[in-house]
Image: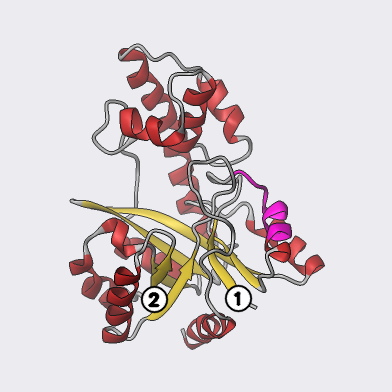
Amino acid sequence: MPADLHVHTTFSDGTFSPAEIVKFAKKAGLNSIAITDHDVIDGIEEAVAEGKKLGVEVIPGIEFTTEIPDAEIHILGYYIDYKLPKLAQTLEKIQKDRVARIYKIIDKLGKIGIKLDPDKVFEIAGHGSAGRPHIARALISEEHVRNIREAFSKYLSHGGPAYVKHFRLTPEEAIKLILEAKGVPVFAHPAVSNCDEIIPDLVAAGLKGIEVFYSGHSKEKEKHYLGLAEKYNLLATGGTDFHGLANGREIELGDVAVPDELVAKLKAAKESG
C-alpha cells in the first residue's frame, strides 16, 4: 500500500486531529503517513499511538518554514527524534514568535478597518500553533472575506497590507537541526519556492531528498525534479500536503502518494546517518 509523506493536523493549520488523520489514512488504504506540522511536533505522539492501534505506520516529522532573502523555503524532516531537547527549545522560540505575530497582524488589520478579536483566532487554532490560516478562518467567520484564498490575496499574503514577518530559521539551519535530531531533511514543494539555484547549497548542507510528487506540481515539474533528484543523488519523496477539509485546498488524503519502497529508502537514509 502507498504512503502519504506530507500531512498536517490541528496542531498546526490542519482541520483534523492526529488521531482523526490516522483513521482517514486507514480508510484511504494507506500503509504509512508522515505527520509534518508546521514548526511544531506536539501532534506526533497522539498519531503514533493511534497508528499502533490501527496498523498504520506514523512517521514522526516536521515542516520547517525557512527563509532566504528572495524566497520562503520549506524543509521537511522525517523520522526525527522529536524528544531532542535542542529541537524543543528551537520550536518553543518559534512558537512564542508566532503568538506575537498574531497580535501584530490583527493590529495591522485594525489599521485598515478590519476588526478581529485575537481570542477568536486562538480559539480557532485550539491547542494548535496559531498562524495566518487561523486568522483567515476568523475573517471568514466575521464575513470580511468569503474564503481562505480571498483572505490571503487581500490581506495576509507576502506583501499584503496585514503581512508580518516572523522568526525563521535559514534552510541550512533547519537541515542541520533535522540531522541533529537523527532525521532525514527534504526540500518541500520546490516549485512553490521557485529557487532551484539553491539546491546545490542545500545538498552541501546535508539535504537528503526533494519532494518531487506534490499536489501543486504538474507532470512537467515532476519530470524536472526527478531529474534534479537523480543529478544530486537525492530521494524523490511525495505527499498531498493534506490540511483537512474546508480549508481552501481541493485535495484528499493520499491523492498524491509514494510506494512503500520509498519509505524503506527513507529509513535506510536515517540509519546511514
Farthest residue, direction front: 219
Task: Check the image and report above or below for 16 versus 132.
Answer: below
Residue neighbourhood size for the residue with mark 1, other residues' Cα within 10 Å, grouped as few (<14), some (14–19), many (≥20): some
Residue 23 place in picture, x, y as percent = 74, 58
In the image, residue 218 lies at what x, y percent?
34, 65
Q: Which residue is mark 1?
A: 2
Q: Helix or strand or loop: what does disc 1 sit on?
A: loop
Q: Please, which residue is most extreme toward the top here?
A: 113
Considering depth in this image, is 115 or 30 the residue closer to the camera? 30
Residue occupying image coordinates x 48% and y 84%: 269
Q: Residue at x 77, y 72 (%)?
A: 55
The reply to whether dot 1 and dot 2 touch (C-beta < 8 Å) is no
Q: Identify residue type, mark 2.
A: Gly
Q: CA distance from mark 1 to mark 2?
A: 18 Å
Give how far across and how far down residue 133 sits, in percent: 47, 37
Eye-nearest disc, 1 or 2: 1
Query: Would residue 174 be found to the left or right of residue 261 on screen?
Result: left
- Relative to 215, residue 123 above or below: above
**Callout 2: helix, strand or loop?**
strand
Magenta-highlighted residues: 15-24
Q: Which quarter of the figure has residue 189?
A: bottom left
Residue 18 is covered by the magenta coloring: yes
Q: Which residue is mark 2?
A: 209
> Is residue 91 at least partly visible in the picture?
yes
Q: Residues within 10 Å of mark 2 (few under 14, many from 20)?
A: many
- The colour mode here is secondary structure
- Three-letter code for the amino acid on which mark 1 is drawn: Pro
Task: Give the residue drawn at x 57%, y 46%.
Answer: 14
